[in-house]
Amino acid sequence: MKKTVYVARMIPQETIDELRKHFEVLVNPEDRALTKAELKEKAKGCDAIISLITDIIDGDLLDAVGPQCKIVANYAVGINNFDVAAATRRGVILTNTPGVLDDATATHTFALLLAAARRIAEADRYVRAGKWKGWSPMFFIGMDVDRKTLGIAGLGRIGTNVARKARGFDMKIIYSGTHRNPQAEKEVGATYVDKEILLRESDFLTLHVPLTPETRHYIGEKELKLMKKTAILINASRGPVVDEKALLKALQEKQIWAAGLDVFENEPEIEPGLLELDNVVVVPHIASATPETRINMGKIALNNIVKALNGQPPDTCVNPEVLKK
């Protein structure tokens, strides 16, 4: 008898088709996140779950699904929706999809940076509204990017990828984080600094830290006041890394020049007032949204499930201690 996999939201059909070669597959047919109660009911009795970052995977849910559930494979690199300790206590393997998102997310980060610096979204809205009456030498003046200082919070895989792209603009690269990255320092010429220097010296600050209790509101009122008035903040990591109320105030009062946001503190809700500002570019959490990336994310999740349900260690286990039980 085939084991059963529940997919919490539609992902590329290629992944679904491949899963069906190995397992019985149940898929949420609606393009929305399930409530916790719905996920409990629909995944009950399944041997594996493919979850998304909108699905809270905790002890309560795992108990409802049942002890036969051996793995929850996150269709995401982030794991802030996982209660890792609760899953480990129950012997449930947790996995994610690192690596394959790096290029797309870094490119998207740089797209936000350029769009905010050169006021692309604001100018686009202006033209579409029929307001453009002709060229002017002082029209939509933006910020230069070339040879400016790029600050990177978290020089991991994605942060290093952003730094590689920045070299094409002859940018000076500084970074901060919990750990130094000597290999990346050598590759991209980055200089390690403390957080205060990062904030004070960056013309552009991009955030690539994971969401943890320590990084929640990594950027708040105090940090924004340390930044240059001409600085631009880019967040394509996790929304709660930035205190959205403090950011709104900083943008309104011109404490910083602009921001580019792919993620938000209480998605899909956005802090009232942000959408009224011209000096912020907002997009709906699409950093990894390319066909190749989405398909490769599915391949990793599928491979992890196949291995786990066949008694083998999956490749991207985030709680490896569970494998020792």
Image (cartoon, rainbow, N blue to C red):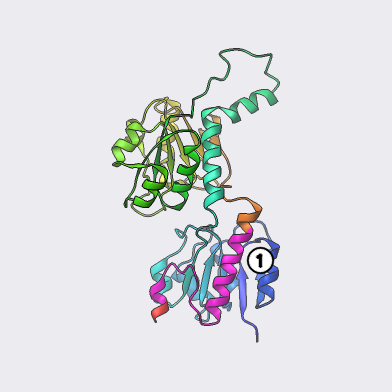
Horizontal side of residue 104 vs 226, given as left or right: right
Q: Residue 191 at x, y = what percent?
A: 33, 41
Magenta-drawn segment: 295-322
Query: Which residue has dot 1 on it?
Result: 15
Q: In which quarter of the image is residue 115?
A: top right
Asked whether residue 292 is drawn in magenta, I would say: no
Q: Residue 136 at x, y = what percent?
A: 61, 12
State the residue in front, 44 or 215: 215
Q: In which quarter of the image is residue 227?
A: top left
Circle 1 SS class: helix
Report if residue 34 is visible in the image: no
State the residue in front, 325 or 217: 325
Above or below, 234 relative to 83? above
Above or below, 310 relative to 298? below
Above or below, 319 relative to 109? below
Examine the residues drawn in magenta and state their main secondary structure: helix
